[in-house]
Each structure stands twice: as C-alpha cells, then as structure tokens.
Amino acid sequence: MSKPNPQDRVYSRDHEWAKDNGDGIVVVGITDYAQEMLTDIVFVELPPIGKKVAKGEPVAVVESVKSVSDVYSPVSGEVIDVNTKLETNPEIVNQDAFGDGWMVKIRLSDAGELKTLLSAADYEQMLKEEKH
C-alpha cells in the first residue's frame, strides 16, 4: 500500500511530484505509487546541472528490475541540483520517494505551471480512477 501523498506538493499525471519551497526552486521526484509500480529501482540516471528542461519532457531515467522509465519534468526551468546519493544508492527512491529519494531541483522559468498540476487530493482521485 502506497504512503499517503503529502499535501505540501503538487503532482503530475505521470506520477511525479514537485515541492515549491517558495523561492522559485522546486524539488522533483517520483511518487510513492510510481516507485511501487516500478518495484526495485537499480539505477537512476540524473541530468547534468544547468540542463534546461520543459514541462513534460524527460528529466531523468529510472531503471528497475522490471523496466526502464523516463521521469518527466512537472515544470519548466533549469536543473540547479541533482541528488547524487541516488547514483550509488538508487534504492533510496523505493525507501523514501517523498524525502531522501528526491531527484532534481529546478529553478522555475514559469511559476504559473505549478497551478496546472494536481493537488494531493486530485492526484489520489486520479489514481482511484486509473484502478477502475
């Protein structure tokens, strides 16, 4: 059973989360539901710092024992930090998707994009609809 989705962030339909720290920088990762569907994560490919990303474009790659999946950026901007711990310990994403398993930090180019993402309640509703 997935952990509850924290209320302090917004979600994409592709199962990424974005946490706005109020300073124009968002932390991005995949949801607990996503890591559960992937099962055991064995490798995370992170983008170079300075990479410009557009909302909906791949920003990272997660490889699990089952598959290889793109992680799509929920916002547009510039990658200013990556979670290098994941390079040697990719299983952190399985253990703590909403915390230590974060993947990238992005300086927003359009803060309005955050309003286009789902609230925790809307994301939960989308998951319920997907399961039916």
Image: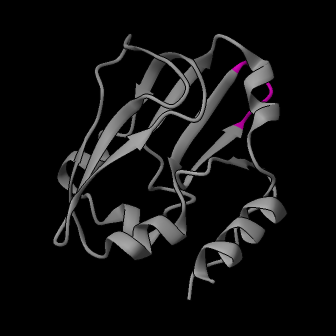
Would you say 101 lies left or right of 22 here? left
Residue 23 can be seen in this image: no
Is 94 located above or below residue 55 in the figure? Answer: below
Q: Which of 62 and 67 is in front in this view?
A: 67
The answer to whether residue 59 of the structure is visible from this angle is yes
Q: Which of 48 and 13 is in front in this view?
A: 13
The span shown in magenta is: 20-24
Q: Residue at coordinates 37% horizontally, 13% vertically from top-left?
A: 51
Q: Residue 5 at what x, y percent from top left?
A: 70, 67
Q: Residue 108 at what x, y percent from top left? A: 64, 17
Q: Where is residue 130 in the image (x, y as percent from the top left)?
A: 61, 73
Residue lying at the far bottom of the rendered structure: 1
Asked whether 23 falls inside the magenta stretch, the response is yes
Q: Dominant secondary structure of the magenta stretch? A: loop
Residue under the image location 77 percent in, 70 percent down: 125
Asked whether, in this view, residue 126 is left or right of residue 74, the answer is right
Residue 55, image x and y in percent? 55, 26
Does residue 20 lie above or below 70 as drawn? above
Q: Quadrant of residue 38?
A: bottom left
Q: Looking at the rendering, in which quadrant would you find the C terminus?
A: bottom right
Q: In this view, does 109 lie above or below 129?
A: above
Q: Which quarter of the rendering shows the N terminus? A: bottom right
Colouring mode (rainbow / by chain / secondary structure / one colour): one colour
Residue at the front extreme of this rendering? 132
**Residue 124: which quarter of the image?**
bottom right
Point 38% across, 40% down: residue:
83
Tell me if 101 is positioned left or right of 17 in this view: left
Residue 13 is covered by the magenta coloring: no
86 horizontally vs 20: left or right: left
